[in-house]
Amino acid sequence: MTVSLLLINILNFSEILFPGTPYHPVEMGVLYSSGLWVSAFSTLLLGVIADRYSRRALFTIMMAGLGIGSIANAFVPQGQGLTTFSLFIVCNIVRGAFSGGLMPIVASFTNDALQKEERSKFFGVLNVVIQVTQIIGMISGAVFVQSGLWALFFLFMGMLQLASALFFSAWLHEPKRGLQQKELRDALASNDKQYSFKLTWATVRSNVLSRTNFYAILEGIFTALVLGIVDVLIIPYMQSPPHNISSVMTSLFMIAFGIPGALFGSIGFARLSDRYGKRHVKYRIYLLVVAIVAMVIFVNLAMFTPLANLDAAQGNDFLLLFSLPVIWMIGPLIFGARAMVGLYNINQPPILQEVNLPESQGLISSINNFTSNLGSATGPVLAGVLLATFNQGYQAVALICIPIGFIGAIFWLLATRRVDSDLLALSSTLRQRAKDLNDQGTEMK
């Protein structure tokens, strides 16, 4: 929700930070990306920690840090140019430092808490929650900012994040590591046996540095870069002259088409993904390729659909806006793009979980998040530079997304050629782990 606040109000925050001046695309790209850059580096450290320590304690610490960063942002003075801009950057850095660990912890936790045939369903629901709260963040953030209450929004979010930290501390149950691996299930059935294996250089070379992981990480860079560009492309395009669609109306537009698309992609495809993923992980990879290519195509079609020219009053008129035929042309394209993002998000984490050891789940997720966050953080800045270079040529920037996105899809297709051999090597290691656990039990007796 906090990220959505900045995204939907990117033009408004330019005025809040630099009052009385034209839109600052480069500075706003840096503002939006600063937290993502820091998150990219913090995720590397926190992913390794997630493989060694209690996920419940780590969840608690991460959410408490996010809360502190949000509450501090509420007390930043408004309209002081570089001073306000710098303080916003500092608060973004604090939030980014703590948010970087969340997805590696989720990856490590769910690898031990969920059976493999349940994972797309879980990540589907998680993706819906993320996308729905992003949309809620957009509409509520637009209302708060247009009312001059942006500081209250940050304060409210910080209190919710601190409450989440208390919830994790009190009620989250810590699962046993490795329990969901079929090779380890029998060996770990006894309550006194714990999976305590740590990564060694040998397992890093054979597992973490596998070719499948290598291709997945490279793909993540390009896909995240495209998504980062798209995030700060469509919304300014709709809100800038001569279209002048207000931030509130933009939020309602995303609610009307974005949320149904997220639900369809994340929930509607979850059962299908799990069914085919149970047969072989390659099917999940093929679904990712479809999702990436289709998403890029939908975005470009939306950007090349001509919007109506409106004044500020018309751009804030709900009935007028939704009576325009062009809105009902772009809407289904946004629906399709959101659905493809959902399909991507419910299949990518289970693939990485399936091809990695229990003791490397947080690490590989953190490496993937590192590269993805770098792409996501670089995307908005690159979009700002390209928009300035092409004199606000939104369509030209959208065209640049096509080859970038297709490169990511190609890397996944290359991964299908090596995934079988990587899975065989993983299974061999896990069988040896199970033998070692059984031998430990025999020695204790």
Image (spheres, rainbow, N blue to C red):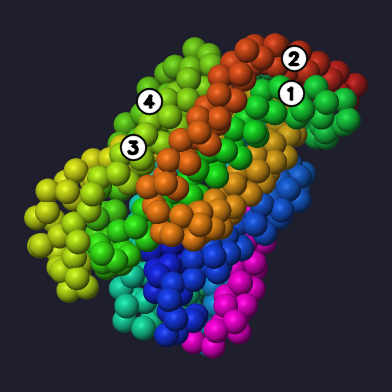
Q: Which mark is residue 141?
A: none
Task: Identify the amino acid type marked 3.
Answer: Phe
Is 120 one of the magenta-colored residues? no
Mark closest to the chain's N terminus, 4 or 1: 1
Name the disc covering residue 298, or none: 3
Q: Earlier in the sequence, mark 3 or mark 4?
A: 4
What's under tag 4, amino acid-wise?
Arg
| Residue type, numbered disc 1 | Ser
Report which residue position mark 4 lands on.
271
Nearest the camera: 306 or 262?
306
Nearer-N-terminus badge (2/4): 4
The residue labelled by disc 1 is 210
Residue contact at pointers 3 and 1, CB within 8 angstroms: no
- CA distance for labels 3 and 2: 39 Å
Q: Quadrant of the C terminus?
A: top right
Between the residue at mark 4 and the residue at mark 1, the CA separation in whole angstroms equals 28 Å
Q: Is residue 149 left or right of residue 114?
A: left
| Badge 2 element | helix
